[in-house]
Image (spheres, grey):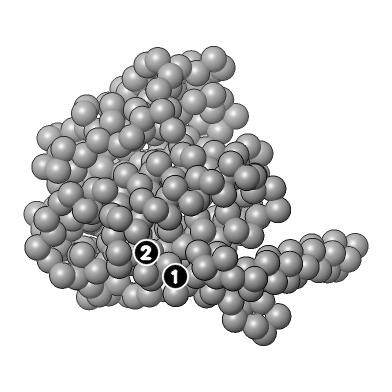
Amino acid sequence: MDKILTLIIPAYNMERYLDRCLSSLIVDEKHMMMFEALIINDGSSDRTSEIGHQYEARRPESFRVIDKENGHYGSCVNRGLSEARGVFIKILDADDSLDSQEFSLFLDFINNTNVESNADLILSNYSFVRENNSFVKSYFFSHYDCPCSLKSISEKDRMDWFIHGLTYKTQLLKEIHYHQTEGISYTDNEWIFNPLIKVRSIYQFKGTLYRYTIDREGQSMSTEQRIKNLSMSFQVIESNVSFYHDNVIDDAGVSSFMVDRLIKEASHLYQLCLFTYNCTVDSLEKLKQFDRFLSEKNSIVYDSTGRYSITIGGIRFYPVSDWRGHNYKIKVAQILYRLADWFHKVYNRTSTK
């Protein structure tokens, strides 16, 4: 491996954002030589490939375009991993970017002999920005003594364990023969989950590296898109549950962290289905199928989601448990939730006038 870092950049019809993404990686000569950015053009029909090749022509030591047929997000990650030459590896979505100044510091941090030799995973803070690159807010991980373990990670940080803050040792992914599900969305949940079975040593970069773009039209994480593609979400979490079930994990802290992740993912899906206005009969049927799958595959996660609670108007409800038991309280909770949501939207519209 002749690079300290590989950045995998999945890109499908991203001509509007790709220049911003790639320009954020232009740093001084010393640091340009330390990384490779693999721009995986996923069969785009716009100028995505052209923009990528312009950067490759200017800085061939750092940028490489891989043009392939459309196969969705997971296929881009798999292709990038297969060609990665970096000691560490990170995914950078084409509509996001990095803080250029922090990027140079990050490269120096991971190029340290101690970190390079011992770190399985690097944590780094991330920011939320709008399409025009205006700052919204930052997320800062708690401070940890390095190296630390998954067992040390706080509840606050477990709630915000997203792809933007994670950089893995490349060899770790190859040792578990990591392969991301292809053809569907939301498979980044596999990237932040499956490799954890081998993570024992975590180091922390204190800078705020990643800039995540929010409120983009058509973004897959919007509620509308999540409901539209609900079957994909179920497929991904079922894949994660099966992965955990099928692998022997010899570290209690790792096992506990992974179960906690599954509980959070499952609880979110239950809430999405039970409290979203436009959730269809078909979606609720998929939820029933998932519920049966979970009860058979992982009783701990199944029982824990039954204890999931939500407070509306000062009243605590247990929506999953009530739904499973056909309890009338789930209907009451849904009505109150929708009323509270309606009042919240009206208040926001009024307060911004």
- Does dot 2 land on a helix, a strand or a loop? helix
Q: Quadrant of the C terminus?
A: bottom right
Q: Which quadrant, please, contains the N terminus?
A: top left
Observer-nearest of 303 and 236: 303
| Mark 1: amino acid | Gly
User: Of all residues shown, which one is farthest toward the front?
Assistant: 326
Residue 171 lies left or right of residue 283; in this view the side is left
The crowding category of the residue bearing disc 1, from other C-alpha atoms within 10 Å (few below 14, some 14 to 19, many at least 20), is: some
**Visible residue check, residue 167:** no
Q: Is residue 283 visible?
A: yes
Q: Is residue 10 above or below residue 135?
A: above
Mark 2 residue crowding within 10 angstroms, few (<14) / some (14–19) / many (20+)? many
Check disc 2 and report the residue beneath it. 302
Q: Position of residue 235 (x, y in %)?
A: 40, 41
The residue shown at (56%, 17%) is: 46
Where is residue 10 shown, x and y percent of the image? Answer: 41, 31
User: In the picture provided, is 295 more to the left or to the right than 250?
Assistant: right
User: What residue is at 59 percent from the left and 70 percent from the top?
Assistant: 327
Q: CA gap, disc 1 to disc 2?
A: 7 Å
Mark 1: which secondary structure? helix
Q: In this orientation, which residue lies closer to the viewer: 97 or 78?
A: 78
At a point 50% along the width and 50% down the height, the residue shown is: 287
Q: Position of residue 91 (x, y in %)?
A: 35, 41
Q: Residue at x 35, y 55 (%)?
A: 294
Image disc number at residue 306 = 1
Query: Label 2 is placed on what type of residue?
Result: Tyr
